[in-house]
Image: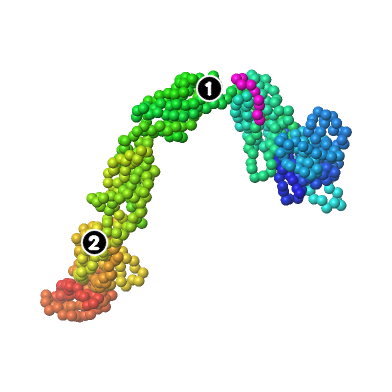
């Protein structure tokens, strides 16, 4: 079985562990030296370590902020540190009990402890003698640094140098022929790491009858202080130490976490006392004192009033009767009556300065609901309060009708209602009523009174009613009901899309494609939307051409078609709830494109008498031409087809000419599907 005695570095707990035994080490860095403390964490290994001794090796790892490479190593003890002979303990043991305990644990023929109920006895229920020696030896060494040095478990390194930082390794000098394994321990220290000891924090005091209990936070500074001293003063200047044995945590090693220590001091009443604490670390240093707390013990008031009867002569007053032990009459200055609208308070004083011998009083100005307590006022400032008693006068006045009722229904049929809270103090709750027709009778949907100012109802959305109606009433503690609130109409959400429109006919014109439709027959339609896509493009998406909110519109001319081909059209209807109808079956329309206007074909000619030809040229705007037809005639009339040219031709040179002859030329373009342009003419004299 293995234990780790948790001292400074492990918070004074006895913890079971499964790892190999090891040396646990801590250090205290001072300006001119380093103090070391260590312990082996398992009883049998601890016994062997005491027999073999400990070696201390110091590694200098940095100097003035610069790493030391290679690391300098130095053995600080020429021979292993072992417990000093028994005679070396005599002087210290006669002065200090912890040194006596430690010497007995190391050298005594037997070792038994019996301290039930004490802090030391609660450390661990040790039955085995070795475990007892181990446990109490380490605890005693924790309380006395000089004794720890005599035991070979502490060392002062006075050879440190300013600006250097060290890693100390403590190992057990196990003979090579032994198979025992005890892991070494290491700690980081150096003069540059010195820090002043802090003040203990969190000291509080609680003064009672003839005593005071002090509490302070142990957990926050458990890595620094292992025990504490309590000091007391009558004048806040001269303090005396109260506890002969330092106070420390003796928590058992379980999953609980102790965060505070406490100390109780018996003191006389009616006298001010001042308290402070000081912490002591594992190296025998005592830190600065904490902040001072003070106070005075007071005699308890042991008697409590009890209200045993109440009379309500009118709706506005009550007479309270109470018991109080006459033995307490001399301890109180009198009584007070306090009132609240709830048995949990807060209570306000409504009558004070009631004599100490009185046992009844009259209270005026009752509310709908009243809770009263009688308070005995101790001369020392201590109060004793009776249990609350309920007083309700006769009440036939109902609450005001609820206001601010509002609600909304979602698409699943869930209705959420809310309203403003009534201000009556005796309000018990509300009742909810519902109807599908505000002219007919409402039925209650709450079977019991409803607490709070909200309610959730569930209805079938798909029924014939478009609205549902609610009203509520408030009820007080006397079951008086208010008048109904104003009726609330909740519209059901629209989940039925409108019927789609229907294409009636279409007309293909030179200007574009004209569509005609029959509008949707649904009453809640607010708009129609028209969509188009190219029919010969498999990847084309529907694009919205227009949306009209004039539901009587039934005609649209699509002038945005540009290229000849197949165009598909569809439509949807939209209602006020943003629902859309299903798209109607698409309509496919073939558009051959637009015919050429006169302005789209530019035709001109030029006479070259020197080279003896007439040059004709032309240009067509944004149209695909299959062929050109060239006409010629003499004079103004008599045009006849002269030449047929390909659609890519841009001009023609006519050389079959006679001098002094007027020629008239005409040009006509032929488009797809036999569409032709008007004949453009030009007159030239050769």
Q: Quadrant of residue 132?
A: top right
Q: Quadrant of residue 521?
A: bottom left
Q: Nearer the viewer, residue 218 or 655?
A: 218
Residue at image mark 1: 326
Please tell me whether residue 641 is drawn above or below residue 300 in the rendered image. below
Label 2 residue SS? loop
Label 1 residue SS? helix
Please tell me whether residue 518 is drawn above or below residue 447 in the rendered image. below
Q: Nearer the viewer, residue 69 or 680?
A: 69
The answer, for residue 287, to whether it is visible in the render is no
Residue 522 is tagged as 2
* Residue at the image point whose x is 35% and y is 43% from the top: 430
Counting from the top left corner in percent of width and height, residue 283 is at 74, 34
Count of marks, rendered view = 2
Find out whether residue 431 is within the magenta segment: no
Tell which circle, 1 or 2, labels the residue nearer the N-terminal end: 1
Find out whether residue 268 is within the magenta segment: yes
Label 1 or label 2, whichever lies nearer to me, is 1
Please tell me whether residue 185 is drawn above or below residue 581 in the rendered image. above
Part of the protein shown in magenta: 263-272
């Amino acid at each position: 079985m293995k234990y780790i005695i948790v001292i400074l570095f492990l918070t004074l707990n006895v913890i079971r562990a499964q790892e190999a035994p090891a040396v646990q080490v801590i250090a205290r860095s001072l300006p001119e030296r380093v103090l070391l403390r260590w312990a082996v964490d398992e009883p049998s290994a601890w016994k062997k370590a005491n027999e073999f001794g400990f070696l201390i090796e110091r590694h200098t790892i940095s100097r003035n902020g610069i790493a030391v490479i290679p690391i300098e190593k130095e053995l600080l003890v020429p021979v292993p540190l072992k417990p000093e002979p028994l005679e070396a303990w005599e002087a210290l043991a006669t002065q200090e009990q912890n040194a006596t305990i430690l010497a007995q644990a190391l050298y005594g023929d037997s070792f038994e402890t019996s301290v039930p109920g004490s802090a030391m006895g609660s450390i661990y229920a040790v039955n085995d003698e070795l475990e007892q020696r181990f446990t109490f030896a380490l605890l005693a060494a924790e309380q006395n640094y000089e004794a720890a040095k005599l035991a070979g478990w502490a060392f002062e390194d006075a050879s440190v140098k300013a600006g250097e930082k060290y890693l100390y390794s403590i190992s057990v000098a196990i003979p090579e022929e032994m198979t025992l394994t005890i892991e070494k321990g290491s700690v980081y220290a150096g003069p540059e790491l010195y820090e002043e000891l802090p003040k203990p924090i969190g000291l509080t005091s609680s003064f009672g009858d003839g005593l005071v209990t002090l509490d302070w936070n142990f957990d926050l500074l458990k890595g620094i202080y292992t025990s504490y001293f309590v000091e007391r003063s009558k004048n806040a200047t001269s303090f005396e130490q109260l506890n002969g044995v330092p106070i420390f945590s003796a928590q058992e090693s379980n999953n609980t976490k102790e965060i505070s220590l406490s100390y109780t001091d018996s003191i006389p009443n009616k006298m001010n006392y001042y308290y402070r604490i000081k912490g002591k670390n594992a190296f025998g240093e005592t830190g600065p004192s904490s902040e001072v707390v003070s106070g005075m013990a007071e005699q308890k008031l042991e008697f409590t009033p009890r209200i045993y009867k109440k009379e309500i002569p009118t709706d506005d007053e009550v007479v309270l009767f109470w018991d109080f032990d006459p033995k307490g009459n001399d301890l109180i200055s009198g009584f007070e009556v306090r009132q609240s609208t709830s048995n949990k308070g807060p209570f306000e004083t409504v009558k004070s300065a009631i004599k100490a011998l009185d046992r009844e009083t009259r209270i005026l100005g009752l509310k709908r609901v009243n809770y009263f307590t009688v308070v005995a006022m101790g001369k020392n400032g201590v109060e004793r309060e009776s249990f609350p008693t309920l007083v309700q006068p006769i009440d036939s006045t109902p609450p005001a009708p609820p206001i601010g009722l509002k609600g909304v229904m979602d698409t699943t049929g869930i209705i959420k209602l809310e309203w403003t809270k009534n201000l009556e103090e005796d309000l018990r709750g509300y009742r909810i009523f519902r109807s599908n027709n505000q002219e007919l009778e409402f039925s209650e949907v709450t079977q019991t009174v409803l607490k709070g100012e909200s309610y959730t109802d569930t209805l079938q959305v798909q029924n014939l009613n478009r609205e549902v109606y609610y009203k509520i009433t408030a009820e007080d503690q006397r079951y008086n009901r208010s008048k109904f609130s104003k009726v609330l109409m909740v519209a059901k959400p629209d989940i039925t899309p409108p019927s789609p429109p229907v294409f009636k006919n279409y007309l293909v014109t030179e200007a574009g494609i004209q569509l005609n439709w029959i509008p949707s027959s649904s009453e809640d339609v607010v708009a129609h939307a028209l969509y188009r896509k190219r029919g010969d493009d498999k990847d084309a998406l529907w694009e919205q051409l227009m949306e009209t909110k004039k539901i009587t519109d039934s005609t649209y001319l699509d002038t945005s078609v540009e290229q000849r081909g197949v165009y598909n059209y569809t439509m949807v209807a939209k209602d006020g709830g943003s629902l859309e109808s299903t798209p109607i079956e698409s309509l496919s329309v073939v558009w051959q494109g637009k015919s050429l206007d006169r302005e789209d074909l530019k035709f001109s000619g030029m006479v070259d008498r020197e080279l003896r030809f007439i040059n004709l040229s032309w240009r067509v705007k944004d149209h695909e031409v299959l062929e050109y037809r060239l006409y010629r005639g003499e004079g103004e009339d008599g045009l006849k087809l002269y030449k047929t040219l390909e659609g890519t031709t841009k001009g023609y040179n006519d050389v079959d000419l006679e001098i002094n002859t007027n020629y008239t030329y005409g040009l006509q373009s032929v488009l797809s599907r036999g569409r032709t342009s008007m004949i453009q003419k030009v007159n030239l004299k050769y």
